[in-house]
Image: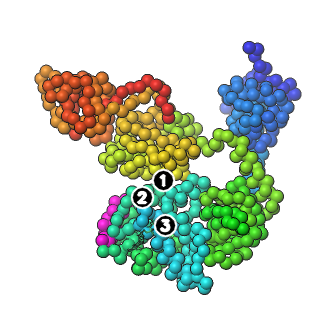
Amino acid sequence: MAKEPLFPNPQVKPPVKEDLKPAVAEAGKKEEIKPAAPAVTLKEIELELPITVKDLAVRLQEKPSVVIKMLMGLGVMAGINQSLGEAETEKICLKYGCRVKKAPGKEELVLGAHQQEDRQEDLKSCSAVVTFMGHVDHGKTSLLDAIRKTKVAESEHGGITQHIGAYRVVLPGGEITFLDTPGHEAFTAMRARGARITDIVVLVVAADDGVMPQTQEAIDHARAANVPIIVAINKVDRPQANIDRVKKQLSELGLAAEDWGGKTITVAVSAKTGQGIDDLLEMILLEAQMLELKSNPHRLARGVVIEAKMAQGRGPVVTLLVQNGTLHLNQNIIVGNFYGKVRAMFNDRGVSVVSAGPSLPIEALGISGIPEPGEQFFAIEEEKQAKELAQARLEKERQSQIREVKRISLEDLHAQIVAGKIKDLKLIIKADVQGSLEAIKNTLDKLNVSEIKLNIIHTGVGNINNSDAVLAMASDALVLGFNVTCDELAKETAAKEGLEVKIYNIIYELASDIKAAVEGMLEPKIKKVFLGRAEVRKVFKLSRAGTVAGCFVTKGKFNRSASVSLLRNGQPVFEGKISSLKRFKDDVREVAEGFECGMALAGFDQLLEGDIIEAYEIEKIARKL
Ligand code: GDP
């Protein structure tokens, strides 16, 4: 094949190697302070990125086919309408003697005003936005209702709140906005869209039920979002209520109440009798005061979508929480791919309002569609700009067949570490039993990966659920399962969002995958297939056969030809093969779950009672990560 000329466009002078030589040599000389005259002056070309191959070709006055061939030379297979990233565009332009200058995109042009930092003197205190979280049935909805009924009716005449997804209470000591969408999953799904929607989380724990799996999930979700937690121990009216037991459980999770030597604000409440609710509100105000929440009411509003629906006769109805600035009637906003002039605004009591400042939730009419909860909105001066930006976003979404968000994955972990893109690897680990979790944590703790910090943001016993998937999404974490499966909904979310979920049956394999991935040594061609796990219950030293372990197969099966890992306190101690497998006195080929056997390992006789032996087969097929 004839070689493609490197610089096919004669109009632009390319940087030839010879030209660069003197510059490099000059730069090497210490005494030379004055920079050497560049051998080639790179022309600046202003491009809006990403740019399609076609548009780039037009700008370079080149045939698209030539650009496509050049890209192939760079290992990039691209069609004429494909968008190119910054790196590829730069490489191609360099071949034409051009340096890329990124033109401000539509986003920057239209939303430029929102990028400006607030001046200190413009900032005013604003009220807190609070979300209730906790295990199902522990009373989140009841508490929200109890507060709404008593406090809203008391403080406002007309009183009754509309359901708009958020409401506000006005107390003598201040105001609070409550988000009415309880549940950490919804909260984290919003966070995954880039929205920080809450200032304080109230963790609801039923006094009779205590800490449950979703209580722990909620704690981890709130912590991952870096939001302070206040604990409400609910249902204290119940005869089975045991407040101390809950406090003890919470202190084990790092949320010790003050009377348990900790700092967590903990209030005993009952949604049924109303006991403690005033205290809870007071504590929320106190926490809000300590957070010194501030915003600037005198600027264009921005905030977040709480919920959105289509209402008959009204069109799209969108509940917005203003987070900064003030939204005025008839102002234009952009929200996701939609835009519109705010035709009407209603507060949480259904009263029509003409403006809404920071921390206020309002229902807005006039938006062109139904945005997702968690989507951010921005007020924009000119309608034309809002419309154009919405169209540009829609166009971009249409064009990018492949999602732009690149999630973290074991496969390219090393590359991302080297590129300095990640400094800590966040992990969510689910396992069949608490013991396995401990062993995994132990093993990971001892993994010597200096390149990166392993940060376990959530662990739990049970299958991988959707809450794990959204947490991973919002926090850019990997999800690892051990002896568990992945729920259907979680699978869907993972597939849709390109999340990496990996399930293991061998602790050692999990740990070594992480280590290998960090070091960029992930071997794709070998797969260890878990066969079984056995516990060493007794150790016999026999003069002829050496050390034999009396084992009990707790899971799966063992066969004579299997490879084995020996784990002691969760740590791999030995990797090798079985040298003898017996049932009573007979050599056997296989021992199934629930049976005892005698086992000797080839080349290892330091077996101890309590050791765990894991058996696996090595499959030599491409491993999917
Ligand atoms: P959520 O799933 O956390 O929103 O829980 P709900 O608010 O739906 O409450 C679950 C159940 O517990 C309902 O039957 C409530 O009536 C009941 N419940 C909630 N709070 C209390 C309380 O303080 N005392 C008693 N006795 N029952 C409560």
Q: In x, y percent, where is residue 613?
A: 28, 34
**Region of the chain picked out in magenta, as a range:** 240-254
The location of residue 391, given as percent across then percent down, is 77, 51
Q: Residue tagged by mark 3?
A: 132
Question: From this viewpoint, which residue is outermost toward the left?
Answer: 543
As drawn, the label of residue 611 is none
User: Alpha-carbon neighbours of circle 2 within 10 Å: few (<14), some, or many (≥20)?
Assistant: some
Name the element at disc 3: strand
Whether the residues at callouts 2 and 1 have beta carbons within 8 Å, the answer is: yes
The first of marks 3 and 1 along the sequence is 3
**Location of mark 1 (residue):** 467
In the structure shown, which secondary structural element does the residue marked by tag 1 occupy?
Answer: helix
**Residue for badge 2:** 214
Where does the image place residue 126, in percent across and percent down from the top left? 60, 72
Picture quadrant where residue 328 is located = bottom right
Cβ of disc 2 within 8 Å of ligand 1? no
